Image: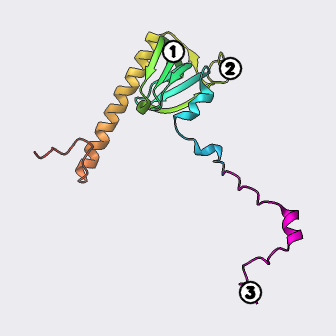
Amino acid sequence: MENLSVSDPPPLGASEAQQHGPPAPSPVPQLPPQMFTTAAQLLDLTDKKLMVALRDGRKIIGVLRSWDQFGNLVLQDTIERIYGQNLFADIPRGVFLIRGENVLLLGEIDLDKEDDTPEGYQQAPVEEVFAIKKKEQEERKRKDKARLEKLRTYGFEGEHGVEAIL
């Protein structure tokens, strides 16, 4: 008498083995599409118009022509879009190389809506928008400085408030 455990399948007879045939190969596991979070996802975006937000706050719009494993991008027919209050302006930049570590966000532009003015904004001359943006940056710096001074009175230090000890 054979010693069978509860988990063992019953032995097959000769006729049953012929009906089942050889065991089917196990399927190769497939990775879900969301697993590809590397530069390989850029393959679908090649030759499409993109908007790229950079770490320094700039917004770049252009056609993705090339990329590498580091996420470095080459854009063609590129413009830099600047915003100030409710105005925007486009500065032509031509061919633009972006280092991958500076990309904060990128997305494909809907070609049906690319010529539409952004909602709530009006196009204006570059000089006018640049002057407004510069004033906004100066105001932000002034507020940040005042905030850091107030925090310092409570004992907090700013990012660069501590001297390095060598």
Cα separation between marks 2 and 1: 16 Å
Side of 43 relative to 150 (left or right): right
The residue range painted magenta reads: 1-28
The one nearer the camera, 146 or 100, is 100
- For mark 3, what is the residue? 2
Instruction: Give the position of the N terminus as an image quadrant.
Output: bottom right
Q: Which mark is residue 79?
A: 1
Q: SS of the residue at dot 3?
A: loop
Q: Is residue 127 magenta?
A: no
Q: On the rendered structure, is 84 left or right of 27?
A: left
Task: Report, in whole angstroms, how far the alpha carbon at label 3 lies from the one at label 2.
Answer: 72 Å
> How far across and how far down the image is residue 135, in percent?
38, 22
Please state, as top left, top right, bottom left or bottom right, where the C terminus lies in the image. top left
Amino acid carrying label 3: it is Glu
* Horizontal and vertical percent position of residue 140: 37, 32
Q: Earlier in the sequence, mark 2 or mark 1?
A: 1
At label 1, which amino acid type do we have? Answer: Ile
Expressed as whole percent of the image width and height from the top left, the position of residue 66 reads 52, 21
